Image (cartoon, rainbow, N blue to C red):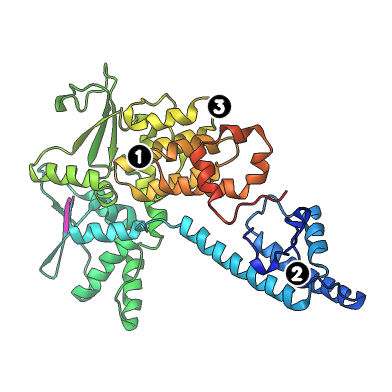
């Protein structure tokens, strides 16, 4: 824990007493006061010590440490005990601020925020709705996923063969344009925004009539974007790939997968720029991806995260991902000692998500890495996170982990495997846990 006040250091002329910590007064207290101080220490100081140590849930304070600490302060005066409690509370509050600073990351948008932005930007719109002589550009996949009415109408619709957007019809609705825009906003975000209270009942009736009752996350998770996708991702290791290969899978090692262009543009700036350029040039929405940068085995993981906002590493396909310079950091983790599979996968997906500008997914991968932090994985994760394209958040968590487990790691052979920079950064802190 942090250093106590300098007034608690007993000055002594003998070298044997230099490391002795005690009260500022050297006068022994009467037995009655001794018992009172012991009770005070048990009631307040011990509670403060346990609170200060609350972060170490896996290793509580040992009885030996508690007994030694109690013996140390049993003869202190009440004012000295109160001063110790005050300083421990201050140190605890300061340590909490340090932990909050170490856990800070840039905020990321929610899936509803991404889709609301997609509705405003009107990129990758493939349909439109005309309501009271006003045209609203929309995305058919979002409407189909959210409303059963639109799904049934789409099944009966004879979509034109041209590349332009098609019209989606609406039933007769006696509402204002402002309320209709709020209805569209609810479809995209799952939230009722800027609707007066006296009109919220009308909006709920419309949602019930068009069967838009489920939550946004549930609808997106259950919708088959691959079957209803309008964009094709082609994973290839062949640099000479040409667009005439699209649609021919036999005798080809390329991997094709359908996806939703609106979800790709809403979530990823990388895909957004590509799809926007292809639509402006009236080109087919076919995106060729080099597997050295984005291995096909992680395609289901990435797409599922784009659609739902959740990281599910169990969706990783069987096979060996292609390694290249962008993923060389993974080899530093895998070399030497075999790492657990979720850690390796999380590092791979993190690199891909950074390449695709999927910041929400990168943070989810960081959470997996931190959850896999242990004495065995500490050295490898520190080496990876210290690389130029590593994770600064994971690097800070490595230091925090070593700071909390310092006494246990120092008593094992793992101490000799730690990088000097990691030890240096750890020992700079006032909160290194050195007690057994």
The secondary structure making up most of the magenta span is loop
Q: Residues within 10 Å of mark 3 (few under 14, many from 20)?
A: few
Judging by the rendered image, the residue that carries numbered circle 2 is 23
CA gap between label 3 and label 2 equals 49 Å
Closer to the observer: label 3 or label 1? 1
SS at mark 1? loop
Name which residue lies at 41% across and 44% down: 391
Q: Quadrant of residue 301?
A: top left
| Figure label count | 3
CB atoms of marks 3 and 1 within 8 Å: no
Work out whether residue 208 or residue 335 is closer to the camera in this orientation and state it.
335
Residue drawn 34% across and 42% down? 353
- Disc 3 is placed on an element classified as loop
Residue 27 at x, y percent in the picture: 83, 73
Q: Mark 3 or mark 2, which is nearer to you?
A: 2
- Residue situated furthest left in the rendering: 281
Q: Is residue 242 above or below residue 232?
A: above
* Pair 2/1: label in front: 2
Q: Is residue 239 visible?
A: yes
Q: Which mark is residue 267?
A: none
For residue 174, say whether it is visible.
Answer: no
Q: For the residues labelled 3 and 2, say whether their Cβ atoms are less than 8 Å apart.
A: no
Q: Which residues make up the magenta segment?
A: 124-128
Residue 58: x and y in percent read 68, 50
Pointer 3: what residue?
A: 337
Write the residue at 69% across / 70% down: 84
- Name the residue carrying label 1: 388
Within the magenta stretch, is there residue 391? no
Q: Position of residue 95 (x, y in %)?
A: 56, 62
């Amino acid at each position: 824990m942090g250093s106590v006040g300098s007034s608690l250091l007993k000055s002594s002329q003998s070298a044997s007493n230099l490391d002795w910590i005690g009260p500022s007064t050297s006068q022994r207290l009467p037995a009655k006061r001794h018992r009172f101080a012991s009770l005070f220490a048990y009631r307040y100081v011990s509670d403060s010590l346990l609170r200060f140590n609350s972060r170490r849930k896996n290793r509580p304070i040992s009885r030996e440490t508690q007994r030694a600490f109690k013996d140390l302060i049993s003869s202190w005066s009440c004012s000295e005990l109160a001063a110790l409690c005050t300083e421990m509370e201050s140190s605890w509050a300061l340590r909490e601020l340090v932990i909050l600073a170490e856990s800070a990351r840039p905020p990321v948008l929610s899936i509803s925020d991404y889709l609301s932005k997609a509705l405003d930007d009107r990129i990758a719109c493939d349909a439109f709705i005309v309501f009271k002589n006003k045209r609203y550009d929309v995305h058919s996949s979002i409407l189909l996923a959210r409303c059963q009415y639109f799904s049934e109408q789409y099944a009966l619709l004879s979509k034109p063969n041209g590349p332009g957007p098609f019209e989606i019809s609406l039933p007769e609705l006696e509402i204002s344009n402002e309320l209709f825009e709020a209805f569209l906003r609810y479809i995209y975000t799952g939230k009722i925004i800027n609707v007066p209270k006296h009109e919220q009942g009308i909006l709920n009736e419309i949602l019930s009539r068009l069967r838009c009752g489920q939550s946004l996350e549930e609808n997106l998770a259950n919708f088959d974007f691959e079957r209803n996708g309008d964009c094709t991702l082609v994973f290839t290791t062949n640099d000479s790939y040409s667009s005439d290969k699209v649609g021919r899978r036999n005798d080809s090692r390329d991997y094709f997968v359908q996806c939703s262009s609106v979800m790709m543009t809403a979530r990823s700036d990388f895909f957004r720029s590509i799809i926007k350029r292809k639509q402006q040039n009236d080109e087919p929405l076919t995106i060729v991806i080099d597997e050295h940068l984005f291995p096909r085995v992680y395609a289901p993981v990435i797409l599922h995260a784009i659609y739902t906002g959740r990281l599910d590493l169990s969706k990783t396909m069987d096979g060996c991902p292609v390694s290249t310079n962008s993923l060389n950091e993974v080899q530093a983790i895998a070399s030497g000692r075999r790492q657990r599979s979720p850690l390796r996968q999380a590092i791979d997906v993190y690199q891909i998500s950074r390449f695709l500008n999927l910041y929400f997914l990168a943070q989810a991968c960081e959470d997996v890495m931190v959850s896999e932090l242990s004495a065995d994985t500490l050295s490898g994760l520190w080496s990876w996170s210290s690389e130029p394209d590593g994770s600064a958040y994971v690097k800070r968590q490595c230091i925090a982990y070593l700071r909390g487990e310092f006494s246990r790691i120092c008593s094992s052979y793992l101490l000799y495997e730690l990088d000097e920079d990691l030890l240096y950064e750890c020992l700079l802190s006032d909160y290194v846990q050195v007690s057994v």
